[in-house]
Every structure is written in structure tokens, then in C-alpha cells.
Image (cartoon, rainbow, N blue to C red):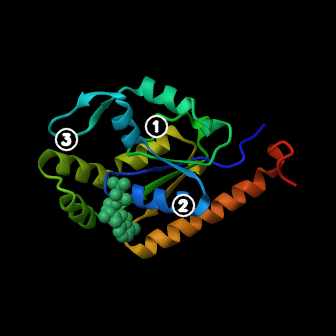
Amino acid sequence: MGRKNPNIVITGTPGVGKTTHAEELARNLGFTHLSVNQIVKDEGFHEGRDEETGSWFVDEDKLLDYLEALPLHTTGGYILDWHACDLFPERWIDLVIVLRCDSTMLYDRLTARGYTGKKLEENMDAEIMQVLLDEAREAYREEVVVELRSEGTRDLEENVERVERWVEQWREDHRDDVDGEES
Ligand code: ADP
């Protein structure tokens, strides 16, 4: 039996707007927002963190076991929000959104969040070098990966509308896959 709803990954450098997009989309679509960083932290799926950059040394096996136990790949309807995306098995994921942001704007957002030194520098470099976009393109089929700008509220509104239309189309296209659930 096919999934009733698609699963969507929202990825990008810290500060690009993943949480903002994921929360709004989850609310509008009735999907479940999984903040993967929060799960790693709350469930202790890590072996400490890098003092300088603050990033977790993630225990990927534990994280994957946790995600595997969710109805993610049976019912769908999940939004996975994380700065990395190549960990999730391709068969779980229907759309990968890579959010992008102008570097001056990202600098302001990250400094407002208290990022300084190496932590700030590494994230700025990652955005400028489009590291997350390249990772997404390497891990998923080309047609699944979409790059979207997240600089102002107008972008946010347009992106949310665009993804909602995409979800409607996905449901339409997968109507027959869902056993007896759809007319
Ligand atoms: P991430 O989850 O990728 O770290 P957040 O969603 O927490 O990013 O956004 C970081 C900051 O930037 C927040 O203050 C948020 O309100 C702002 N922001 C992100 N995207 C936009 C956007 N498209 N328009 C206006 N503000 C945005």
C-alpha cells in the first residue's frame, strides 16, 4: 500500500529559514514537523558536541532507528527539518527543499542569534559554497531537489504556497496507490 501523503525534507545552512518554513507548512498541511536537531538533542542521539562550532557528533544509527519506528514511511505527512539531508533513505523522501539566502542577510541572522568566530565563519562559508545544495543533489534524484530563496516574508509566502500546490498534485498523482482510502 502506498503512502497517503508525501514526506518533505527542508534543508539548508543554519539561519536560512528551515524552522519558519517547516512550522508554517506543517500547520497548513496538517503534517508533522520533525526538527531533527531537537530530536538529536532531546533523545541524546549524540556523543557530545564540538566546543567551538556547537555542532553535535550525531549517532546516526540511533537517529535512523528512531525515525524508522515512526509511521513516516507508511503514512507519510512528515516534514524533516535539518541542516543535513543525506542521511535519510531516498525511498522515504518525496521532495527535498534547499533554502538559500543572501550572505549579508544570513550574516545578520546568525549574529542576531549570537553566532561568532568559527561557528559563524563555517556557516557563512557553507552557504556561499552551496554545500547543502550540493549534498542534496548528490543524495537524491535531480527532480526531487528544489532550491528556494528565503530572504523576505514574500519569499516565505510564495514558497509555502508553491509547496502546498505541489502536495495537492502529489496526492492527485498517488490517489490510486492508497488502498481503498480515496474515492
Ligand atoms: P533555520 O531553522 O534554518 O536555522 P529559522 O527559521 O530559525 O532558520 O530562521 C532564522 C531567522 O531568520 C528567524 O528570525 C526567521 O524569522 C528569519 N527568517 C528566515 N526566513 C525568512 C524569510 N523568508 N523572511 C523573513 N525572515 C526570515
- Of helix, strand and loop, which one carries label 3? loop
In the rendered view, does 113 fall on the left or right side of 162? left
Q: Which-is-in-front pick, marks 1 and 3? A: 3
Q: Position of residue 91 (x, y in %)?
A: 62, 36
**Residue at 60%, 50% in the rendered image:** 143
Viewer can see residue 48: yes
Q: CA distance from mark 2 to mark 3?
A: 31 Å
- Single out the mark in the foreground, 1 or 2: 2
Q: Which residue is mark 3?
A: 53
Q: Looking at the image, is mark 2 or mark 3 earlier in the sequence?
A: 2
Q: Earlier in the sequence, mark 1 or mark 2?
A: 2
Q: Outermost residue toward the left?
A: 117
Residue furthest front in the image = 42
Q: What's the amino acid at mark 2?
A: Arg
Whether residue 16 appears in this view of the structure is: no
Q: CA distance from mark 1 to mark 3?
A: 21 Å
Residue at left 41%, top 45%?
82
Near-viewer residue (16 or 74): 74
Circle 3: residue type: Thr
Location of mark 2 (residue): 27
Q: Left or right of 3: which side holds 49?
A: left
Q: CA distance from mark 1 to mark 2?
A: 25 Å
